[in-house]
């Protein structure tokens, strides 16, 4: 899943990037509010981690403009420790959660996973479809109780489709959430989904011709 990380302190940004990559996400890092606003307006992100103190345009203004434009992706605000006014204002404007700096990597990941679960309409940390089970806390995927070994790319694709079960996920949308935007498309994704099907069972992921991939919410 693509996660936009907006943070102007290079060390903090790099750290968040490493942590999110290790947790199975595809982070895209930008360092100023204007670029963040533009990307959030024009591209699709599963969630945003948004520092509030930013050059060019502050984080609260960025968040306000997204919400006024009807953008609903979950946003976690990064605030300086003790700045309760920022946190209150952030939540009033439409932040889904906040985290004070400095923070523990595990806490950021736990909060990110929680807002993603809530935004997909399911509060439980495990996603269960038939015999398939994804534990979003441990990144463990099991089929009939047996752990499935997935590569990082296979995990990203599986996790995104499971978070959007019951919906047709467009080829381009899935591609961007696995590989990032602006890449060539070709049949890379098809090959990847072929590998996932081998690991999880052929019947789980349906292809909707000309549209995308589909995992039923409650398969027979
Ligand atoms: Ca900052």
Image (spheres, rainbow, N blue to C red):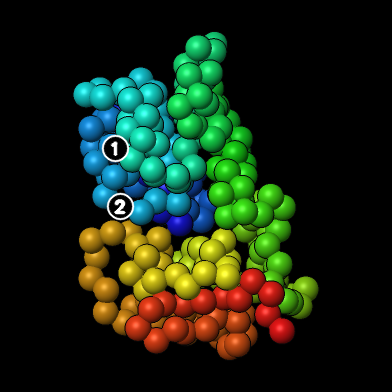
Q: Which x, y percent locates residue 182?
A: 23, 61
Establish if 151 lies above or below 78. below
> Residue 202, how many percent across, how many down?
58, 88
Q: Which mark is residue 23?
A: none
Quadrant location of the C terminus in the rendered image: bottom right
Label 1: which residue?
36
Question: Can residue 10 be seen here?
Answer: no
Q: Position of residue 159 (x, y in %)?
A: 55, 63
* Dot 1: element: helix
> What residue is disc 2 on?
43
Instruction: Work out which quarter of the rendered image holds the N terminus and state it.
Output: bottom left
Residue 160 point in image, percent of width and height: 51, 63
Other residues around mark 2 within 10 Å, as few (<14) / some (14–19) / many (≥20)? few
Label 2 residue SS: loop
Residue at 53% in and 18% down: 88
Residue at the (35%, 20%) spot, across then down: 53
Residue beneath the point at 33% across and 25% down: 61
41 and 163: which is toward the camera: 41
Mark 2 or 1 closer to N-term? 1
Q: Is residue 154 left or right of residue 145?
A: left
Q: Is residue 201 above or below residue 49?
A: below
């Amino acid at each position: 899943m693509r996660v936009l990380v907006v943070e102007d302190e290079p060390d903090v940004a790099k750290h968040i990037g490493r942590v999110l990559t290790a947790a199975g996400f595809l982070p895209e890092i930008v360092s100023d509010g204007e670029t963040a606003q533009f990307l959030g307006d024009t591209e699709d992100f599963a969630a945003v981690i948004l520092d509030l103190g930013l050059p060019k345009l502050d984080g609260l203004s960025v968040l306000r403009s997204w919400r006024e434009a009807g953008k609903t992706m979950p946003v976690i605000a990064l605030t300086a420790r003790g700045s309760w006014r920022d946190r209150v204002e952030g939540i009033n404007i439409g932040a889904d959660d906040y985290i004070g700096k400095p923070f523990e990597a595990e806490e950021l990941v736990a909060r990110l996973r929680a807002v993603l679960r809530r935004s997909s309409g399911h509060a439980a940390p495990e996603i269960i479809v038939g015999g398939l089970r994804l534990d979003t806390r441990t990144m463990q995927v099991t089929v009939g109780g047996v752990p499935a070994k997935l590569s990082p790319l296979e995990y990203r694709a599986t996790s995104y489709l499971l978070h959007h079960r019951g919906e047709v996920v467009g080829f381009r949308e899935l591609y961007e959430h696995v590989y990032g935007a602006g890449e060539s498309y070709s049949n890379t994704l098809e090959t990847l989904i072929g590998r996932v099907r081998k690991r999880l069972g052929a019947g789980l992921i349906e292809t909707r011709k000309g549209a995308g991939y589909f995992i039923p919410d409650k398969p027979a």
